[in-house]
Amino acid sequence: MPISQYLFEVYVYIKSIVREKQTLFWTIIFPITYLLLVTFIFGGGSKVSFNVAVIDMDNTEISRALIEAMNSSGVFTINLLDSSCDVGSIMREGRYDVALIISQGFGYNISHARQGMVSIVYIKGLIDSESAKAAIEGFVGSFGSLLVERLLNTARPYIPGAVFGYVVFIAKPINISYSAVEARSLLTPGGIRMYYVLSTIGVMILYTGLFTGLGSILKIRREGVIGVILSSPIESHKLFIANMLSGLVSIAITSISIILMGLALGADMSLVSPVGWASITFLLLVGVIGVMGMGYLIAPFVRSNEAATAIANAIAFPTMFLGGIAIPKFLLPRKIRIFSEIYPLSRILDSARNIAVYGWNPRQAFEYSLPALVISIAIIIAGWTLYRRTLEHAVERP
């Protein structure tokens, strides 16, 4: 089969996308709709914010400084309430994650080297409220440590040198240093949107690849052209390549549509260099042919469109979640995560996402996904072998 014939097969498939509404839906409309949904539901980034009710019974400069520091942190949304409020009732209504009560005398006590008192009210057993409680504890503790440091610096001239070290130890036995690292991760909205762009491509690879392989034998059986094909000079491997090209063209069109929509939604592709895109393209290409190989392995045993659809959904739907393809792996239970680590498409897709989102260099990605790449190539070779043998026996077993 000359190259012009392969190109003609691609041309025919592209025309079918426009003519057949069902093909158009699954190739372009469905993946864009899916990406829109996951982006608007999960694509806002993972910035933490807690809704905090604050009752300031002290109303001094120090108490106001604490409230202002919390408000400017970006972690807490502060809602000042009157001291006559029933905090328990307000918390049970679920309007706030946590309540902070600053007791009267808070500022006076601190300015006179005494303990200032605050109370935290939270809902026991509610994850959001428990998390807000821990965040408030950490922030108030940091605020207290800052006050301790200022008091120690003020009192240092009046404390003998031999004693000062013990005073510092009692006030602050462990000194923590912090080092901020600029990292590109799912914490940024553009990062998580890029993550879901590639995840959506992975989902479409899973479905399109399986349907391409599963329908390879079924299509020519249904059209009744197996005998004609086998009596023609066309070799089976050329039919195999033509069928694969149709699937690859479908994935290419789908991927371009998803990437363009991702850009429109604000996916950040700034870390992806031309070499990175080339690496991602190669990785996904191998991932596609590996999934197709699974379809080719099952295709000889499929006798109807209904059976092909049922098998494809039975494989694709669970693995898109359990394999960490549609969702991040860290959301999966640890025991299930084992499957996602050995599933070839999942590991390949992880490498592509790590290049695009975390800035991995291609060498890291290929080293990580090498076992999956080898398995995918082995699967497509096995699928081609079974496909060829099925065609050879198709006349005797139509």
Image: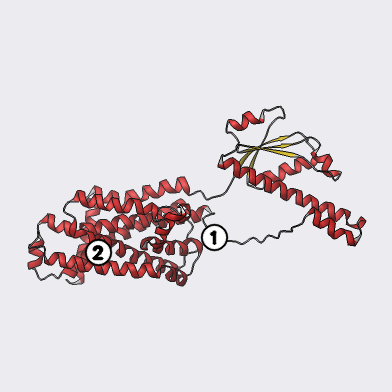
Write the residue at 74% across / 39% down.
Answer: 118
Q: Quarter holding the C terminus?
A: bottom left
Residue 328 vs residue 374: left or right? right
Q: Nearer the viewer, residue 357 or 304?
A: 304
- Locate residue 383, reporting x and y percent: 24, 65
Residue 259 vs residue 135: left or right? left
Write the residue at 41% across / 57% down.
Answer: 198
Up the image or down, 242 lies above or below 76; here it is below
- Locate residue 5, reporting x and y percent: 18, 67
- Locate residue 309, reporting x and y percent: 24, 50
Query: Could you say which quadrant of the image residue 365 lies in?
Result: bottom left
Q: Which residue is mark 2?
A: 244
The secondary element bearing badge 2 is classed as helix
The secondary element bearing badge 1 is classed as loop
Query: Could you say which quadrant of the image residue 201 lies in?
Result: bottom left
Write the residue at 32% across / 60% down.
Answer: 252
Amino acid type at mark 1 = Arg
Q: Which residue is mark 1?
A: 184
Residue 103 vs residue 310: left or right? right
Write the residue at 68% across / 48% down.
Answer: 138
Amino acid type at mark 2 = Met
Q: CA distance from mark 1 to mark 2?
A: 36 Å
**Upstream in the sequence, badge 1 or badge 2?**
1
